[in-house]
Amino acid sequence: MPSSQPKSAETDRTLLFVAMGTPSFIREDLDLLRRHFRVRTFLYRPSRRVLPNVWQQMRLLAWLAVNPPRSRTVIVWFADYHAFLPVLFSRLCGGKSVVMLAGYDVTRIPELNYGVFSNPIRSACARFAIGRADILAPVARALIDKARLHVPAIRGRIVHVPFGFDASQWFRDTPKENLVLTVGFADDRTRIRIKGLDLFVRAAERLPAVRFAVIGLGPDARRMLKAPPNVQLFGGLPRSELRQFYSRARVYAQLSLSEGMPNAVCEAMLCECVPVGTAAGGIPETIGDAGFILAGRDADAAAEAIRKALKSPASAGRKARQRVADHFSGVIRREKILSCILS
């Protein structure tokens, strides 16, 4: 992830950008920022072993020493191992720090050993970053309460900055089918539980005449997920093929145990899928009044909500698309990110 000069900068300000991994939403943020600023980037490569993480911290320390955040804004994606030093340097050097929160970084599920706050070292780094950052930018409002649960004394401003989506890239261009879809990367039992794929399969068992599909499974997860005959299992798909599934599916179900703001729900809604979701994280605020929210994690209730969604008129799909276009556009995200930096 090399540094880049803007082609037509509105300002000659230099930003520091620190991230752990490069999922599509981080790449899109980088593309946005590079259109407006000079951006210097650092990619932290996490490991489950101690020594590789110590090495990454040393690399980050050296990078910050060469690129001190003096009178600059440093943007950190996720509150985790890699957030401590950038926020600390920013405070020491008089710069501004913006920490983006996505869900995992304000979560603790002890029985699954899931979430940053399930690990004492990671939680200490996250607690410092969340408590001392100048601006916290959660992608969903539900994450604000979760952050305050772990860090009651938050000193900075909190600015809700939802993900943004391009309606010209996600759209329906095929007739709808009686297909219920869910999308979520899963490669082990923990991810299967977190993404609610076990609940999705149990709901599918109660609707044997309806076709279901799961996209994003690793080889091990496909073997672990005992799916009935009416459920098709797929690995990860390129964006073009994924959009075709969204276009065909009448219902999109996000039955997660834990979630931030689920990108797949918004993509599916733009393709006029009627959404069904659990009351986890940012799912209810994403779906709003354009779909169905489960009160609990009961398979019978999930099947009933899916049955109702399948019977919804075509106007329900159009309403779902309009909700995302109105509330979660790329333009809104651009304006909010630039406001965090320039204000």
Image (tube, grey):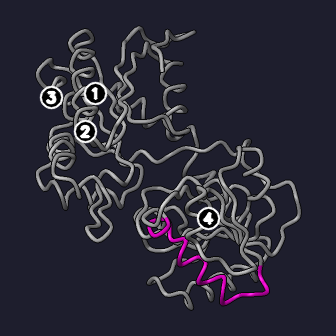
Mark 2 or 4 closer to N-term?
2
Which of the two discs, 4 and 3, sits closer to the camera? 4
Dot label at residue 88: 3
Bounds of the magenta segment: 192-210
Tell which circle, 4 or 3, labels the residue nearer the N-terminal end: 3
- Compared to residue 185, the image places residue 6 above or below, namely above
Q: Is residue 341 left or right of residue 230?
A: left
Q: What residue does disc 1 label?
A: 56
Q: Which residue is mark 2?
A: 81
Label 2 or label 4, whichever lies nearer to me, is 4
Residue 160: x and y in percent read: 37, 48
Q: Amino acid at mark 2?
A: Tyr
Q: Nearer the viewer, mark 4 or mark 1?
A: 4
Residue that appears at 60% across and 57% down: 219
At mark 1, the secondary structure is: helix
The reply to whether residue 300 is in sight is yes
Quarter where residue 63 is shown? top left
Rendering coords of residue 262 (x, y %)? 51, 57
